[in-house]
Image (cartoon, rainbow, N blue to C red):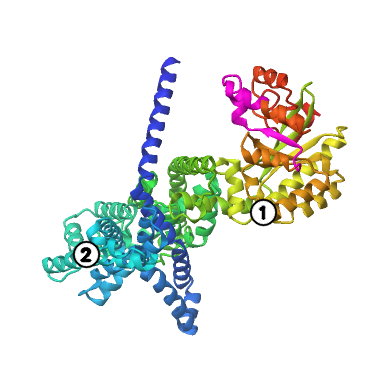
Amino acid sequence: MGGEQIFTKKEKLFKNRLLKLLFNIENSSFLSMIRRALTMLIPMILVGAVAYAILHFPCEAFSHWITEEQTWISAFLEIVYQVTFGMLSMIMVVTLAISYSMERSEPVDKMIFYIITALASFSTQLIGIEKDAMWNILGKTGYIVAMIVGLLSCALFSKLSRIERISLRKYTVGMDAVLANAIQSILPAMITVLTFAALQCGLSHISGGRDIYTLWAIVLERGFSKIENGYLSALLYTFLVHIFWILGIHGSHMMENVALENFSLIGGRVTFSKSMFDAYVMMGGCGTTICVLIAIFLFAKKKRLRNLGKLALPTVIFNTNEILNFGIPIMLNPVFAIPFICVPILALTLSCGAAVIGILPSVCNETSWTMPVLVSGYIASGSIAGAVLQAVVIVLGVLIYTPFLKMYEKIYDMRMQEKISRLVDELHVYENNGENPDFLYRMDDTGMVTRTLLQNLKIAIRQKELFLLYQPQVDGDGKCIGAEALLRWNHPEYGFIYPPLIIYLAREGGILPELERMLFDTAISAIRQISDCGQKEFKISVNITAHSLNWEMEAYIAEKLKEYQVEAKHLWLEITEQDMLTNSNLVISKIHQLKKAGHKLLIDDFGMGHTSLMYLQSENFDVVKLDGSLVLDLTEKETNQKIVASVIELAKKLDVRVVAEYVETLDVYEMLKNMGCDWYQGYLFGKPMPLDELIKNFV
């Protein structure tokens, strides 16, 4: 039993180390740059994949109709395909340049020059080569050139831009941003483009005018011609195709000069034809990715993955998997490298073995590579055994992919949690400095995460996924006289989101009114339910900001109070001292209206600053809530004791009540009680809880 426990501990330790290693690899800035660039390609990939799937729809009657009778349809779809997949490498250079500049947190006006320089550098690779080769480089085949040139040109441009003499910064003083960046980019861009032009000239001279793909084709043909065993040739072909894909290169196009039809036979039974490869190995595309799709639908917990699976489904059915490759992504993803390579090799081995022992008839019929699975297996072999073999491979493939899919989800969670933690840490810094952050407008990871959360928040508000918890407030006798409503958002993928971050997102995203309508509706409904339980004087306080007063909040509150038959005196409104610094006429007017309507107004985080005393003087506020930092260290710091005692004494003279939050120990409670504090809130009395629990325990 002890041995089993030791083994289990070692196994868990190994898994944790493996997860950490894969997380570090996946989270590297290099892979993040490329992954972000690939993600930006998804719209073009989706449009091109749909056009291509329709063009090669596996129905002879339909194919004849669009190519012979309605030629304009095929011409139109061909144009769509050529401007997407046919220009994909060039588009990738653009997305790589954008991603690189985002990784370096460059402003948009500087990012433009990264794009221009990368495009010009990539264009040098097109000079002096044949037209067909040029289109290959511009299209899917040119991934490797696009990736190398795109990244290296941006890196060189960035390095040169930081050199004072080359950047010409001293000549741009007083100029506007665009002109200054243009002048500062002249020499770095020129040197970068000239460098890649020189490299292209050197390569062309050495290779006798051949482009890199022609050289690669020659190497492939010579290498495969020396392999006499057909299975080994097919195995090597399968391995190389998928290795290229994992490295971010279009493997099928890199290996298209290897003719499967020329591979030798095994025992006179197996013919390694393209039809066999398409039918039994490339089901759903390279990597046998129909298995990934099924695994996503069966086992994926992330909504993002399930939605991606729904988008990919129509194309994967017809064996086009770019949406999965670019969207998950599978390319350049160390987590999926093993199953992406192993499942096709397994499929190849099983199909060869089945053919050798006579279970699977030799592939005798040609099928379109877009033919859906099961149908293609039956047609290719002329036997139901072909479809059965495909089903067996898919089941095994799903079993192989599933643990890696689950591992990927864990790593994705780790990556997002780290990004959100950094975002929250930065927000804390801004809060402590009294500044308003600009997260939504930043071009780095923080900006992207913020914008993603904002979109999620909009959906969450519409679907009523946000909710309130209630923390009880008690008087000196321990009787619960009310509660503070606290906003919570349990994100389906990232867990609970820091509440001030929710408010920031809603405010900066222009959806604060929608969020606060939900908040007031829920809180007033809660007051009604508590009143129906016999607590007629129970009150609930809700936090608002100065921005809350910029919409017709008071009218909406009045409407809801009337709807639920609740008096205004039972809905208290808390506003922080910092928010009250927005001392506009509109804010002051709204405060007066709310006071006149019968609401009790609280100053939250009250200290002894000049502004705090000024707002007390205005007579608009009925209650002050002590700054939590004063209460937390009350028993340890004599200074805090003096400040709190002074606030309570001043409040009593002005007929203002005092609430202390963060009351977590009996010593703090007793000290506050002796000072004359009116009400108390904190873990000593109760944590924030759902409404039914509040009613059960405190009403």
Q: Nearer the viewer, mark 1 or mark 2?
A: 1
Nearest the viewer among 319 and 177 is 177
Residue that numbered label 2 is attached to: 191
Image coordinates of residue 562 in percent, x first then y, are: 86, 49
Count neighbours of disc 2 (C-alpha within 10 A) and say few if under 14, some if 14 to 19, many if 20 or more: some
Tell me the CA gap for discs 1 and 2: 54 Å
Image coordinates of residue 638 in percent, x first then y, are: 58, 20
Of labels 1 and 2, earlier in sequence is 2
Residue that numbered label 1 is attached to: 584
Nearest the viewer among 335 and 677 is 677
Please report the bounds of the magenta region as a residue range. Answer: 619-645
Against 156, residue 404 (above or below) is: above
The answer to whether residue 593 is visible is yes
Q: Relative to residue 32, is residue 421 drawn left or right?
A: right
Is residue 643 in the magenta section? yes
Nearest the viewer among 372 and 270 is 372
Image coordinates of residue 163 in percent, x first then y, are: 24, 56
Identify the amino acid type marked 1: Ser
Is residue 677 in the magenta section? no
Q: Quadrant of the N terminus?
A: top left
Image coordinates of residue 337 in percent, x first then y, are: 36, 47
